[in-house]
Amino acid sequence: MPEVLKAPLVVEFPFTRSLGPVQSAFLTGLREGVVLGVKAADGRVLVPPVEYDPVTAEEIRDLVEVAPTGTVTTWAWNHEPRRGQPLGTPFAWVLVRLDGADTALLHALDAPGPDAVRTGMRVRVRWAGERTGAITDIACFEPYDGAAVQPAGHSGEFADPVTGIVTPARLDYTYSPGRAQSDYIHALSGRRTVGERCPSCRKVYVPPRGACPTCGVATDEHVEVGPRGTVTTFCIVNIKAAHTANLDIEVPYVYAHIALDGADLALHARIGGIPYDQVRMGLRVEPVWTEDARYPDHYRPAGEPDADYETYKELL
């Protein structure tokens, strides 16, 4: 049996968005310890609030304060909390209809175990110690057996409203390549670049996909390409990447599409060994390998005359 390749991969980035008047008021209210909903055309109070009526699609801005106490409408127990979740110990995900609201809010309930959670139980907001204007200002919900808290009737107007939020987005997954990409990776370990030729259109695809994206037929004929190639298009990177293996690369630098000799599809790689403002379309380049590397660290000028545009125009 051939070795099954797999590797852990992470896609992570900060998601930045501006806020409209309703979401701004809602998050600013959380910062101030107030929960706001919005009244729809049919009189229902929606929490969390939305900016457009779900029935009529009309814009709505009639803000209504609701209580920080409420009732669990449904729940599910989380035995193994993951990184970034509200609590580090097992907890319940709950939908809570706050007193004064007609819809339910999803959040965490701090409970000693699933036997302590039930539909219909009363809960209240546990506020975070430091609040910034985010849903995490509600640290979680907790069981509550007191009287319903009466809201003060806040207008939703604040002197210093939250106008934008930054939310970290992250996806952790394990990638396992198929037959074609496994062959490609194994070839790279020997400092060779291998593509596959379509039996119909005869194009050579690098990296191989196992099937021709144009003809839709399976590909299994290996074709070694390169190692040299031609820069087709490129961009100049001016923002330093975070949380990557390339933290030592100083900006600006160039990332380019490179058509390796013999390939009919350009791959992308970094260009080094030349000032960023001297990189150009048609530049002939060659790979630079570092010790024990599994793929080229970057490509550098090969010392050849630039390729004629007609030779790579179809690969742009």
Image (tube, helix red, strand yellow):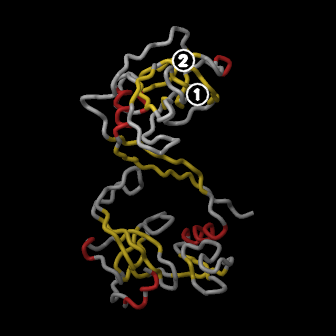
Q: Nearer the viewer, residue 46 or 267?
A: 46
Whole-percent x and y of residue 230?
40, 82
In the rendered structure, the answer to whether residue 304 lies left or right of residue 190 reads left
Q: Is residue 56 above or below residue 299?
A: above
Q: Disc 2 on helix, strand or loop?
A: strand
Earlier residue among tags 1 and 2:
1
Which amino acid, mark 1? Val
CA distance for labels 1 and 2 = 10 Å
Q: Nearer the viewer, residue 134 or 260?
A: 134
Which residue is painted at 62% across and 66% down in the image?
A: 182
Q: Look at label 2 and name its amino acid.
A: Val
Horizontal arrangement in the rendering, residue 64 relative to residue 192 (left or right)? left
Which residue is depicted at the point 49% across and 21% down?
100
Q: Which residue is mark 2?
A: 123
| Callout 1 touching callout 2 (CB < 8 Å) | yes
Q: How many marks?
A: 2
